[in-house]
Each structure stands twice: as C-alpha cells, then as structure tokens.
Amino acid sequence: MTKRVLDLGPLLRDSHTKVVVICGSGGVGKTTTAASMALWAADAGRKVAVLTIDPAKRLAQSLGLEALDNDPRRVDVELADPKGELWAMMLDTSRTFDEMVAAHSTPERAAAILGNPFYKVISTSFSGTQEYMAMEKLSTLAATGQFELIVVDTPPSRSALDFLDAPQRLSSFLDGRMIRLLSLPTRGVMKILGAGFTLFSKAVTTVLGGQMLHDAAQFVQLFEDMFGGFRERAQHTYELLRAPGTAFVVVSICEADSLREASYFADRLRAERMPLAGLILNRTHPPLAKLPLPAAEVAQEKIERSAPLAAAVLGIHTDRQAVRAAELHMRARFDRVHTDLPVIEVAALASDAHDVPALREIGRRLTAA
Ligand SMILES: Nc1ncnc2c1ncn2[C@@H]1O[C@H](COP(=O)(O)OP(=O)(O)OP(=O)(O)O)[C@@H](O)[C@H]1O
Ligand SMILES: [Mg+2]
C-alpha cells in the first residue's frame, strides 16, 4: 500500500481555496507553518492574510508585526510574483470580543457592557474564548472579501475539543443558561458553578462583592438583546469552517504524545465533517547521507583512531539514523490507523524559523510533494 502524499502546492494555489486552518498540539510548528504557507501562496501571486496567535517575537518582527494589532498589515517583502500580497496580523482576543459587542449593539449599550465587571471576566477568562475569537476574526476577515486566501493559526489548546467546540459552546453559553445562573443569589451561583465550572467559578470569585447582583442583572439584560446576533454569528462561522473553500491541516511532530493528539484531531474533524486536507509531520530527521546504519557503524569503528573527526561525523550520522528509525516506527503506527490521510514530512531546519528566508525554505518543503 502506498501512502497518499499531502500535496499542498496545488491546494494553496487553487483559487477555490479560501481558508486554511492549521491545528495541532502545543509547540509543534503551527504558527511557523501558517506563516510559511501564507508566504508561499503570496509568492505564487495570491492576496493572502495570515492570522497568527502569539507568534514568537522574532517571527512577529520578521512579519512587521510590532505590537498586538487586530487588523492585518501588509508585510513589506518582495514576492516572487508581484501580483501577490502578504498581510499578517496577531490576534488580540479581548479586542476582538469588544469589536463583536460593538457590532451587535448601540454605542451606549456597548459602552455599558464593556464597563461591566462580568464582561471583563468573561472576555478574558471564559475557557474557549481565544479559540472562539480566532474563528470570529476569521469570519470577519472572510466577510470583507479583501483576501483571496486566509491562513489561520490556532491557539495551543490543551484539548482539541476546546477549539472545535468553541463556536457551539459560546453560542450555548450566550443562549443565557450560564448567564441566568449568574443572576441567582450568590450562594446558589457558587453551588452550581462549583459543580461543573471550576474555571468559571474561579473567575466569578474575582468579581464577587456587594456590586455583584447589580452588575450581574445589568449584564444579563444588556447581553440578552445581543444573543440573537451572536448565535447567528457563531452558526455562520461554523458553516464557514465546513464550506468547500476551507481546508484543515493538522500539524504534528513525530513523537508519541503529539501524534496522539493529531490522531484525535483527525478523528474529531472527520466526525464534525470538517474538510481535512491532511497531516504535516514537522521537524523530522531524514538521513543526511545514503550510507546504511550497519555500514556506517563499522566504518566509524575502523577510523576511530586514524581519523577521529571523520569518525565523529559518522557518529552524528548513526545517531540520526536511530532517531529516524524511531520516527519511522511512530509514523507507521499512525499510518496504520489513518490509512487514507495524506501526509507530508517537513525536515527540521538547522535552526529556528523566524525570518523570511527560513519561512520560504519551510514553504518549499511543505509543497515538495
Ligand atoms: N521545520 C522546522 N525546523 C526548525 N525549527 C522549526 C520548524 N518548525 C518550527 N520550528 C521552530 O519551532 C518553534 C515552535 O514553532 P511554532 O511557534 O510555530 O509552534 P506552535 O505550534 O505555533 O507553538 P504554540 O503551540 O506555542 O503556539 C519555533 O521556534 C520555530 O521557529
Ligand atoms: Mg503558535
């Protein structure tokens, strides 16, 4: 059986591809991959925006992102095809929430909501807010029609569920069930929230006080008027994620924990009927030379004394062969479960990928199928 290779070049170049969502566990290279793909597509002549989340400082600088900025900025880079454009932004979660409130209410109401202590807690610490706001921003950017392609990075969710459930969770949250809980007397609130919403109850504790009931009542009233709009919006975002022009790509490194999460992502995306394009196996270690392991070990032993430097180089080669063997084992295990999921391997660069040349190199490797 030959495994299908993930062919990202045609996907990124295709004018039907409008949104690419990158997901995966923490630290695997999501932000780097998102930026590399966006640059590659811009080099190919498309007008592209990349929405990043907490990029490494040096990567942000390379993209001209000096501070959190909730609107995409054009990246000052000479592209292979001058028709292309690269835009980039860093997501500001609480500002995106503010903008969403403003879009669904009058200026006076928006001001009252933004000033309410419950709002502050919810917009910054309700679990899933960052995931939801990333999708909200995607939705707003897509609606402007300003870009041919939007590449979306996702937060390092502890659980894949957080990310996939965000639209629906926020929508049911905004349905008022939780907010109605807030308008119960304090003890009742703590009892109910304490049972299942530890994170949230902790957040509520921070605003408990004499003002609480008043604030809660005001908050419920102000928010209730916006529920309809919010719900519609969450539904719209969810549908955009499922639309034919959207592709999900899962990123993983070739290690057990990361692949387990990748596996889970793949299953969840399929179960939700989200358009999953394939898996990127990032930072792999293909052999440096064609010399097979036993021959290299024999040679290394033979020249240990006469040519210690050469022997040391061979040593690096044999170590790497061992790493590779472990990677191939991991990959085979994954492939056996996800037989028809296309995969592309991206070999690790010698150093971190924080500047434009490194992003281009990763872009080349990503599209080398
Ligand atoms: N193929 C690669 N070769 C070498 N370094 C890489 C490669 N891919 C990513 N890196 C480096 O690995 C580090 C983590 O990458 P990145 O920030 O993109 O991961 P992430 O999945 O977005 O992390 P987080 O979950 O924290 O957001 C960065 O320093 C990046 O430069
Ligand atoms: Mg990241």
Image: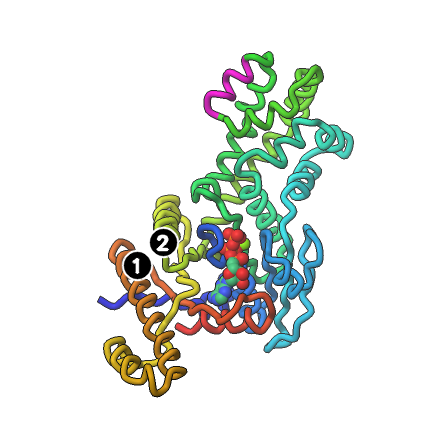
Front position in the image: 181 or 127: 127
Residue at mark 1: C-beta within 8 A of ligand 1: no
Which residue range is magenta in the image?
A: 188-196
- Are there few (<14), some (14-19), or many (20+) residues within 10 Å of tag 2? many
As shown in the figure, which amino acid type bears the numbered disc 2?
Answer: Leu
Q: Position of residue 168 (x, y in %)?
A: 49, 36
Residue at mark 2: C-beta within 8 A of ligand 1: no
Residue with the most extreme bottom position = 306
Residue at 46 percent across and 43 percent down: it is 158
Q: Main secondary structure of the magenta part?
A: helix
Which quadrant would residue 249 be assigned to in this image? bottom left
Residue 33 visible in the current orientation: no
- Label 1 or label 2, whichever comes before in sequence order: 2
Q: Position of residue 42 (x, y in %)?
A: 58, 69
State if disc 2 and disc 1 touch (CB < 8 Å): yes
Residue at 63 percent across and 66 percent down: it is 86
Q: Position of residue 208 (x, y in %)?
A: 65, 20
Q: Which type of secondary structure does the marked residue at label 1 adopt? A: helix
Residue with the most extreme front position = 305
Quarter placement of the C terminus = bottom left
- Are there few (<14), some (14-19), or many (20+) residues within 10 Å of tag 1? some
As shown in the figure, which amino acid type bears the numbered disc 1?
Answer: Met
Q: Which residue is mark 2?
A: 259
Residue at 63 percent across and 58 percent down: it is 57
Q: Which residue is mark 1?
A: 330
Front position in the image: 252 or 92: 252
Q: Position of residue 146 (x, y in %)?
A: 64, 59
**Residue 348 falls left or right of residue 116:** left
Question: What is the CA distance from the residue labelled 1 to the residue labelled 2?
Answer: 8 Å
Which quadrant would residue 45 be assigned to in this image? bottom right
